[in-house]
Amino acid sequence: MMLVVEGEVIGGNRLGRKLGFPTANIALRDDLNVENGVYVSKVFVEGVEYGAMTNVGIRPSVDGSKRLLETHLFGFEGLLYGLILRVELLEKIRDEKRFSSVEELKEQIAKDREIVKSRLK
């Protein structure tokens, strides 16, 4: 399975940054046929490849409503706003779900990161 999404990085609510997992956010076309969930991914920034953890969905734990792609790039430092990213979704590791607290969400993201990193090796 590999699905490619390309789009411009837009501003978000910066919750990922506050949780220690900053993300680049890309609005999704309504006709994009991809399941909501967390994915092992590769992201290309100006021709440079990064391993990444990507969430596709509405972010139900933080009262999200608009469907969005959020991707956390491993080893990237800097700002991505306004850049066009190529995100390759390689493998889905879990469905999107609602967590009862931000702390529970943060713990799950840390677990997801370990799974994603092990699958990228």
Image (spheres, rainbow, N blue to C red):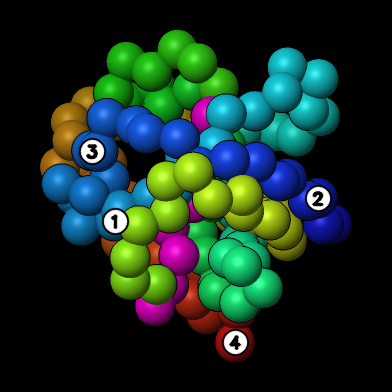
Spatial CA span between label 4 and label 3: 28 Å
Q: Is residue 14 left or right of residue 76?
A: left
| Label 4: few (<14), some (14–19) or many (≥20) C-alpha neighbours in 10 Å | few
Look at 24% across and 38% down and name the residue there: 14
Indicate the quadrant containing the N terminus: top left, top right, bottom left or bottom right: bottom right
Amino acid type of the residue tagged 3 in the rendering: Leu
State the mark number for residue 8. Answer: none
Q: Residues within 10 Å of mark 1 (few under 14, many from 20)?
A: some
Left-right relation of 80 to 13: right
Cβ–Cβ under 8 Å for marks 2 and 4: no
Q: Is residue 69 magenta?
A: yes
Q: Secondary structure at mark 1?
A: loop
Q: In the rendering, at what x and y percent does residue 24 appear?
A: 44, 48
Residue hosting label 3: 15
- Give the amino acid at mark 1: Phe
Q: Are marks 3 and 2 in contact (CB under 8 Å)?
A: no
**Which residue corresponds to the image point at 33% horizontal and 71% vertical from the top-left?**
77
First of labels 2, 4 by sequence position: 2
Residue type of the residue flagged with mark 4? Lys
Find numbered disc 2 in the image and state the secondary structure of the residue it sits on: strand
Residue beneath disc 4: 121
Q: Amino acid at mark 2?
A: Leu
Q: CA distance from mark 3 to mark 2?
A: 26 Å
Residue marked by disc 2: 3
Counting from the top left corner in percent of width and height, residue 55 is at: 52, 43
